[in-house]
Structure formats: C-alpha cells, structure tokens
Image: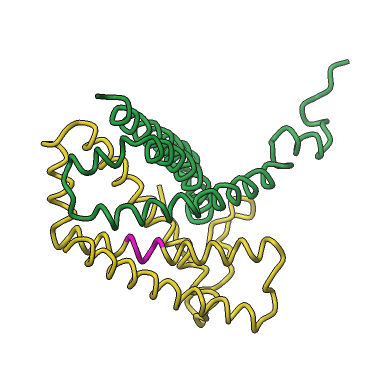
Chain colours: A yellow, B green
Amino acid sequence: MKWKLTISTYDPKVKRIRPLSPNIQIYRPQLTSVLSIANRITGVILSVFAVLLVMSLTAAAAGPNNYLYITALTSSWVGQAMMFAFTLSFFVHLCGGIRHLLWDAGYGFELRTIYASGWAVVFSSIVLTTIAWIASGIVGR
Amino acid sequence: MKPKLNSRLPIVRAHGLGSARHGVEHWWAQRVTAVTLVPLTIWFTASIITLSSSDHSTMIRWLETPFCSISMVLLLIALFYHAALGLEVVIEDYVHSGAKIPLLVAMRMTCFALATTGIFATLIVALSD
C-alpha cells in the first residue's frame, strides 16, 4: 500500500511511471497557486476541527464533569494555539471560498483582478483573525 | 438474442458507471453547501468568541435556545456534507493506490457518523429539562 503525494504516478496500462503536472519541485510558488493549496489545506484543518466540535457537543450533552475536559483543553496553551489555528484557517477558507463563488458566478477573471482578490483574501483573513482575537479578549475579561 | 457485455456502446457504459452528470452534482452540491455555510459558520465563530472561557451551564443555556439548536443542526448537516465533498476530492487527487476506495468509503462513513452524533448531542441538550 503506497500513499502518493509525489510528482509522478504509476500507469498500469503502459507499466511505467508517468509524470504529473505541475512538477512541484521546479514550480515557483505564486500568490495564485499558494492560495489554491491554502484553501485545500485549511479545508482539511477545518475538517479536523469539525471533529472537535462534535466532541464538545457530546461532552456538553453528557454533563458538567465531561465538559470540564473541553474547558480544560480550550483554556490551555495548546488549546489556545489550536483555537488560533482554527480562526485563521476559518477566515482563509471563508474569504477564499467567497472568491471561488465569485469566480463561479463569472466575475474577476482578469489577471489584475485575480491578484487583487488574492491579496484581499490574505489581508482580510489576517484582519478578521485579529478582530476575532481582540473581541475574544474583551469578552473573556 | 442477449447482447454481450462488451458490445455495449461506450456512451451506455459511461451512463452505467455514473460518470455522466455526477461531476455536475458534486460541483453544485459543494457550492450550495458553501453558500449555506457562510452565515452559519460566521454565526458559529461569533458565538464561540462570545462564549470563550465560559462554563458548562452557560454553554447549555446558549445551545438549548431554539434558534441555536436549529442553527447547530443545520451547521452540522451543511458542514459534514461540505467536508465529505471536499475530502473526497483531496483523497481522489493524492491517493492512487488500492487504499483509495476504502479510504473514500471510510471518510464518508465517518462524516455521516460525526454529523449524526453531533445532531443527537444537540437534540439531547435542546430537549432535556
């Protein structure tokens, strides 16, 4: 059993290794390609947090003693770092997703617009994450 | 006369394998769940910010209100549907071994099980005294 995250794949029909495009070893990262893979990575990260959401709901339904494990986790340094990863991933995926939906509706295909919307995703996700943490700090006080 | 299996036209085989239209359905469902998740996830993230560092009773009092319970159930449905569609493409793109199909089935089952568990827990909180 082989897990392949590589640049080539085995073609059983011709019995040899075929290259896959893009060849990531010689591929210079651009804003467009970085945001493309970022949307996918943040999607996978958010799927992991969806599991934590179900665990929290189950703990809440089970009772106060079980829920203590959740509050202990979220109040710890590890938990806070995880919550930061969640908020950043969420806003990157949200903004990137809205950008994708605008493309699907037929808007923003000019190269200048693609880069402008790309930088908008980067800045708005940083700003929104910062706002979320400032708001959380004010509420938590 | 019975037609032989290999005498089928390629288009008939394509329909039988489900390749035709399936991609459109996947694409469309991913977009519909994405649009649905925009308000639901913003509500959820805003809620956990206001609920941060709160205890069990505060959390229960928040979740048991009809608006929150219904929103949470809708969130769980849309979230795990969207996650299953996204993870499906990720597995299809990166796993080229025999593990691909079992992994796809396991991922789907896990998403279904988690959504059901989350909805069940939400209903327990919402419907208990």
Query: Quarter-wise, where is residue B109 in the image?
Result: top left
Give the quadrant of the N terminus of chain B.
top right
Q: What residue do we see at 33% from left, 66% from top?
A: A132
Magenta: predominant secondary structure element? helix
**Residue B70 placement, left or right of A139:** right
Q: Is residue A99 above or below residue B27?
A: below
Q: Is residue A55 magenta?
A: no
Q: Is residue A87 in the magenta section?
A: yes
Q: From the viewer's perspective, is residue B42 above or below residue A137?
A: above
Q: Is residue B89 left or right of residue A136?
A: right
**Residue B25 x/y as whole percent:** 66, 43
Q: Which one is nearer the viewer's eye here, B20 or A53?
A: A53
Give residue B128's position: percent from left, percent from top. 27, 24
The residue lying furthest to the top in this view is B1
Q: For the image shown, how many numbered marks are present on the structure? A: 0
Residue A110, percent from left and from top: 70, 79
In the image, what residue occupies the spot 43% across and 52% down? B41
Quarter of the picture holding the C terminus of chain B: top left
Q: Is B120 left, or right, of A34 in this rendering?
A: left
Magenta-highlighted residues: A86-90
Q: Residue at x 47, y 49 (%)?
A: B87
Q: In the displayed structure, does residue A110 sit left or right of residue B115?
A: right
